[in-house]
Amino acid sequence: MASPSEHKATIIDGKAIAQTIRNEIAAEVHHLSQKYNKVPGLAVVIVGNRKDSQSYVGMKRKACAEVGIKSFDIDLPEQVSEAEVVSKVHELNTNPDVHGILVQLPLPKHINEEKVLTEISIEKDVDGFHPLNIGKLAMKGREPVFLPCTPKGCVELLSRSGITIKGKKAVVVGRSNIVGLPVSLLLLKADATVTVVHSHSHNPESIIREADIIIAAAGQAMMIKGSWIKPGAAVIDVGTNAIDDPSKKSGYRLVGDVDFQDACKVAGWITPVPGGVGPMTVAMLLKNTLDGAKRVMEH
């Protein structure tokens, strides 16, 4: 037996896995363009000029170009009315060259997010946030048209790393509509025993310590310590938190919700931040867009 201090978790390289998936997608897109003389199309709608949203949208558009998906760029001003956003969504719903519609969240305060997302055609809801898609995800024996990208990316990381989900104890930390809630439903669909830990949970540490699989999506920098992790557990860290770091040119660095150095000494597998879940989210968005296009073209 190696002494505990020598233990090193296997790093799950999200960047490399995402690149493999993107290569698979590019090959399929090429095949579609040869066979049907059409390529998948993704419309990305962004409202206002939040720096983080701009950067995410830039990444998504660049990724589309890399695999041969046509991207439709819809940039709306911060002050745009809700009705105008909805009418733009309707226009995209009827455009046959658009197979996926993504509205970058969060939207400005004066726009009702639920109203806008509900207007997206369920057949084009590549983010998987339409209430019908989430509802189907929650029900046994129903299949959503699309799975949300980040949760789908988390499960893909586990399966491509050879980690079994069925029958395992999974703990999801956080219950947001974007990650925590849907990933808990997805793990349940994959036959895990799922517990969700959130801000009102008593003694989260003792619950997390029982987990074979931890999905950390709480948005709290380095909240989960090595001592909270069961030896050999698989840790998927969805958190992206900026913390001050004077040694960096930007003045900050990105860390996850898990104390990475500490966790590496205990966990069996772990995703780094950055380079773990992030690239997978974008890869799953491309995959959903491809799948949406295939549904239309092959029928």
Image (cartoon, grey):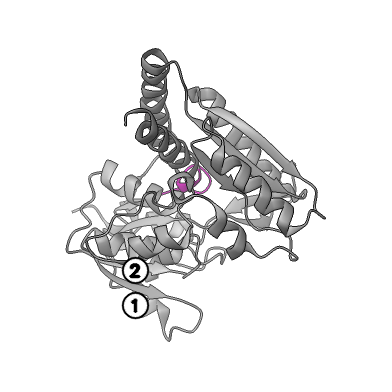
Q: Earlier in the sequence, mark 2 or mark 1?
A: 2
Q: Quadrant of the C terminus?
A: top left
SS at circle 2: strand
Residue bearing mark 1? 207
Residue 102 in picture, x, y percent from top left: 56, 46
Q: Residue 171 carries which label?
A: 2
**Relative depth, front residue between 264 and 18:** 18
- Is-magenta flag for residue 273? yes
Q: Is residue 60 above or below residue 175?
A: above
Q: Would you say 162 lies left or right of 37 here?
A: left
**Kind of residue indicated by mark 1:** Ile
Q: In which quarter of the image is the N terminus?
A: bottom left
Q: Do the residues labelled 2 and 1 touch (CB within 8 Å)?
A: yes
**Relative depth, front residue between 156 and 216:** 156
Residue 284 in picture, x, y percent from top left: 43, 41
Instruction: Please give the range of residues in magenta.
Output: 271-278
Q: Would you say 237 lies left or right of 240 here?
A: left
Residue 155 in picture, x, y percent from top left: 33, 51
Question: How far, Cα to Cα, is label 2 from label 1?
Answer: 8 Å
Name the main secondary structure of what is drawn in magenta: loop
Q: Is residue 14 above or below residue 214?
A: above
Residue placed at 67% from the left, 42% from the top? 55
